[in-house]
Structure formats: structure tokens, C-alpha cells
């Protein structure tokens, strides 16, 4: 998917989801001393730093302001040599596409072996209940293919891979150092807690619900404080909030959602500024007061 396709998606999705309280991205900034994020319209990409090593989780849209916003975090794109991909949708891999600025041309990309079939053309990504095929994403980075349950290390950063198919066939989430769970498009946070991600964008909603139930069982069994970090709706370490509605699906066109924190149009970035990025920590999600 080329840059023009990212721009087309910005226009169409902006019009489609205005006023629906669906997208609630974090603004650019730091969650804590280890995790930072950049906002790209409605999507967040993340950076994890430990002992001087920074890895990246997802690569956002094919987005012209990425290097500028990384500068607000004092992260040099050239320092990124390892990049984890949750899934291959253009708002998660755009900065790797052939016609992007190729800021991460030297990075190794880690991706589920199942998800990689979209990139090779063996599978075609479908949305809107299978009625619409997305353009194929093309990239040239070196890839390392991952399996469900695999644990590996980048320097002394521990990464555990958990397969959660449904949104896409090979969607992977990553538990880093047993403390941070990067969930991509597995979970959608409403004002009253987490749901399975947006219905119209899933390959298989029933499968997504089963995956979310298994993920809850997996994470709760660890009996640890874990920050759950989503691709579009913020973060929290309150697992009751995360899995509050895990048996339900976010349905933006048949259900009305009310969230005072949600912008009318998530594609308007007026509040995402360098001053704000440097001004404090990014607050976690919590249940709205009744």
C-alpha cells in the first residue's frame, strides 16, 4: 500500500468515523521511563528502551511527520535496528513500505509466520466482512518469522510472542520483559472497558473473541502487574478494565459509544505537540465516572 493509499485512508476513515468515539490514540510522549509512543493520526507506534537499546513496536502509517515526532522523543530513526510488527495493516507497517521515507531500512522486522503470508501475496487482507480487499503491502526489510509461544531476546530485552488471530489471520501480540503487553488491534477500549476490536475490520470476529478469551486466561494466570498497550485507544494496567467486555465486539455502525475523552475526529492532531510530548507522562485509561 503506497503513501497515496495512506492518505486515501485518512480521508475516508475520518469521514466514516467522525463523532463515533471509536479512535482515542495517545498523543506523542512517554508512558514511563521505558515506553514511548508517536501518534500518527488515529494510530500509535511504540518504542521500548532498556539499557540504552531501543526497539520499535509497529511502524504506523506511511506518514510524513514520523521523523519529526520521533525527534520530540529524542529517538533517532537510524538507531532502530529491531522492529516488531503485530500485523500487516497499513497503519501498522506503513513506514516500511517501498515508497516511504525508509527511515528503518536497516531494521530487522519480526512478524508472525502466518501474518507474513499477506506480505508474500499468499493471502489477501479483507475487511468489511470480506467484501473489500486491501492493496498488498510491499517491503524489503530483512524478516525474522515468529511462532506462537516463541520467546527470544534482543540484547537483554525478553520478548514473548502470543498469537491472537481474528483481526488478521496471523496477528501477534508481544509481552516484553513480562511487564508490557503490546496488543496492536486485538483490544478496543471504550469508556467502560475493553472489547474485541472493531467488527468491520476483522477477518473473523468469532475467532477474535476466542483469541481474546485465551489471551485473558494467559495474562491473568501470570498474577503480575502488566501494562496493556493498544494500537488506537491508549493503555492501562487494570486487567478488569482491559477484559471488561471481552465477550463483546466493538460495532461502530450499529452501536453508539459515548466517551468524553474521544475526539470528534481522531485524524485531527492539533493537541499533538512537542511541548506536550515533553511535558509529562501519558495517563492510563480508567473507567469513566457514572
Image (tube, rainbow, N blue to C red):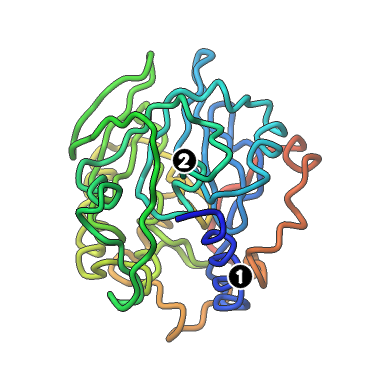
Q: Helix, strand or loop at disc 1? A: helix
Query: Residue placed at 51% from the left, 56% from the top?
Result: 232
Viewed as shown, does residue 20 lie left or right of 83? right
Query: Residue placed at 43% from the left, 57% from the top?
Result: 241
Front residue of this view, candidates 113 and 279:
113
The picture places residue 163, in percent across and down from the top left corner, at 23, 46
Viewed as shown, does residue 76 lie left or right of 46? right
The picture places residue 11, in percent across and down from the top left corner, at 61, 70
Local crowd size for mark 2, using a 10 Å CA cut-off: few (<14), some (14–19), many (≥20): many
First reached walking from the N terminus: tag 2 or tag 1 = 1
Which numbered disc covers residue 41?
A: none
Q: Would you name the residue on which mark 2 appears?
A: 96
Q: CA distance from mark 2 to mark 1?
A: 21 Å
Q: Helix, strand or loop at disc 2? A: helix
Query: Residue placed at 30% from the left, 38% from the top?
Result: 223
Front residue of this view, candidates 287 and 279:
279
Which numbered disc covers residue 11?
A: 1
The picture places residue 25, in percent across and down from the top left corner, at 58, 55
Local crowd size for mark 1, using a 10 Å CA cut-off: few (<14), some (14–19), many (≥20): few
Amino acid at each position: 500500500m503506497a503513501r497515496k493509499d495512506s492518505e486515501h485512508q485518512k480521508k475516508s476513515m475520518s469521514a466514516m468515523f467522525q463523532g463515533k468515539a471509536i479512535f482515542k490514540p495517545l498523543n506523542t510522549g512517554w508512558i514511563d521511563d521505558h515506553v514511548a509512543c508517536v501518534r500518527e493520526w488515529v494510530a500509535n507506534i511504540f518504542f521500548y528502551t532498556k539499557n540504552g537499546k531501543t526497539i520499535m513496536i509497529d511502524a504506523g502509517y506511511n506518514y510524513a511527520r514520523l521523523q519529526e515526532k520521533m525527534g520530540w522523543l529524542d529517538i533517532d530513526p537510524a538507531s532502530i535496528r529491531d522492529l516488531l510488527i503485530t500485523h500487516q495493516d497499513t497503519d501498522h507497517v506503513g513506514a516500511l513500505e517501498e515508497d516511504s521515507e525508509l527511515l528503518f531500512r536497516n531494521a530487522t522486522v519480526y512478524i508472525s509466520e502466518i501474518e507474513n503470508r499477506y506480505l508474500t501475496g499468499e493471502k489477501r487482507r479483507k475487511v468489511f466482512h470480506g467484501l473489500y480487499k486491501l492493496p498488498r503491502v510491499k517491503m524489503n526489510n530483512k524478516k525474522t518469522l515468529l511462532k506462537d509461544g516463541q520467546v527470544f531476546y534482543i540484547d537483554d530485552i525478553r520478548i514473548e510472542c502470543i498469537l491472537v488471530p481474528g483481526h488478521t489471520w496471523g496477528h501477534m501480540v508481544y509481552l516484553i520483559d513480562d511487564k508490557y503487553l503490546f496488543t496492536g488491534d486485538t483490544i478496543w477500549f471504550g469508556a467502560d472497558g475493553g472489547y474485541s476490536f472493531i467488527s468491520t475490520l476483522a477477518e473473523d470476529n468469532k475467532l477474535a473473541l476466542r483469541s481474546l478469551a485465551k489471551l485473558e486466561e494467559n495474562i491473568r494466570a501470570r498474577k503480575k502487574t502488566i501494562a496493556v498497550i493498544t494500537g488506537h485507544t491508549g493503555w492501562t494496567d487494570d486487567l478488569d478494565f482491559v477484559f471488561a467486555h471481552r465477550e463483546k465486539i466493538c460495532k461502530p455502525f450499529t452501536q453508539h459509544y459515548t466517551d468524553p475523552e474521544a475526539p470528534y475526529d481522531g485524524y485531527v492532531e492539533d493537541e499533538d505537540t512537542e511541548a506536550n510530548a515533553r511535558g509529562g507522562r501519558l495517563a492510563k485509561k480508567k473507567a469513566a465516572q457514572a
